[in-house]
């Protein structure tokens, strides 16, 4: 039994602190994922809160959760899409205009060499130009170091679909970066073309 399963059992037995320990390391990534879908810091908080509530209720009802991390990201993604549809309007908020979102984006995780060399704000601006079904897998793969299998579970997509979306997203990103002379060499060097 892994530590996630132990924490889930503790939660079911009434240990409220265990839920905080279970989700603590996932919140920053969950907020980033929600922000990429919603582009609004207020809606991000709502989406993550709804996902946390649903996760707690599911655990208390005894739902069988084999791999909590991708399951939780899927929940966050679904609640973000629900809120996006509910609002039925597309609102774009620049990361530079939102200091709170910019601060949340600064949390560190492993990056590829390319991502380490590129200003995060510029990369997020480029990612914002890519279709959502390619942007989310790229974010999860490169910024959150999730495996293709975990991304597949989190998004409820076939692994080959995730691979295709990553490939198309990288190609689109290379096209965008290729137009900027500053990053043309990096795009060629790190093989995102």
Image: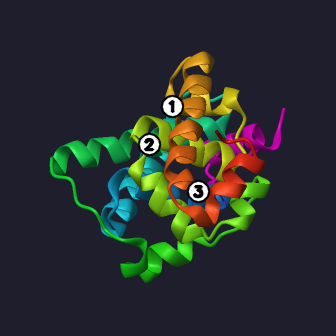
Spatial CA distance of label 2 from label 1 is 7 Å
Instruction: Mark 3 or mark 2: name the one nearer the start of the chain.
Output: 3
Q: Is 134 situated left or right of 146 in this image?
A: left
Q: Is 26 situated left or right of 61 in this image?
A: right
What residue sits right under mark 2 in the picture? 77
Instruction: Mark 2 or mark 1: name the one nearer the start of the chain.
Output: 2
Secondary structure beneath disc 1?
helix
Q: Position of residue 103 (x, y in %)?
A: 54, 78
Is mark 2 in CB contact (under 8 Å) with mark 1?
yes
Spatial CA distance of label 3 from label 2 is 11 Å
From the viewer's side, name the closer residue of 137 and 58: 137
User: Quarter holding the C terminus?
Assistant: top right
What residue sits right under mark 3 in the picture? 29
Judge whether 186 appears above or below 68 on screen.
below
From the viewer's side, name the closer residue of 66 and 139: 139
The answer to whether residue 57 is seen in the rendering is no
Judge whether 72 appears above or below 107 on screen.
above
| Residue stretch rendered in magenta on the structure | 1-23
Residue visible at 58% across and 48% down?
139
Residue visible at 28% across and 62% down?
92
Q: Main secondary structure of the magenta part?
A: helix
Q: How is the image coloured?
A: rainbow
What residue sits right under mark 1 in the picture? 155
Q: Position of residue 166 (x, y in %)?
A: 59, 33
Judge whether 83 appears above or below 17 on screen.
above
């Amino acid at each position: 039994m892994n530590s996630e399963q132990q924490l889930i059992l503790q939660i079911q037995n009434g240990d409220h602190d265990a839920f905080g320990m279970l989700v603590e390391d996932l919140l920053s990534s969950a907020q980033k994922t929600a922000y990429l879908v919603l582009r609004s810091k207020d809606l991000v908080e709502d989406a993550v809160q709804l996902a946390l509530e649903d996760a707690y209720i599911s655990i208390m009802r005894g739902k069988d959760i084999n791999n909590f991390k991708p399951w939780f990201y899927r929940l966050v993604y679904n609640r973000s899409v629900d809120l996006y549809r509910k609002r039925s309007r597309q609102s774009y908020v620049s990361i530079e205009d939102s200091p709170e979102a910019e601060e949340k984006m600064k949390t560190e995780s492993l990056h590829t060499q390319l991502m380490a060399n590129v200003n995060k704000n510029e990369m997020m601006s480029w990612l914002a130009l890519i279709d959502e079904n390619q942007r989310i897998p790229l974010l999860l793969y490169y910024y959150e170091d999730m495996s293709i299998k975990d991304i597949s579970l989190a998004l409820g997509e076939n692994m080959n679909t995730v691979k295709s979306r990553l490939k198309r997203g990288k190609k689109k990103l290379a096209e965008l970066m290729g137009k900027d002379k500053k990053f043309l060499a990096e795009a060629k060097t790190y093989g995102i073309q």
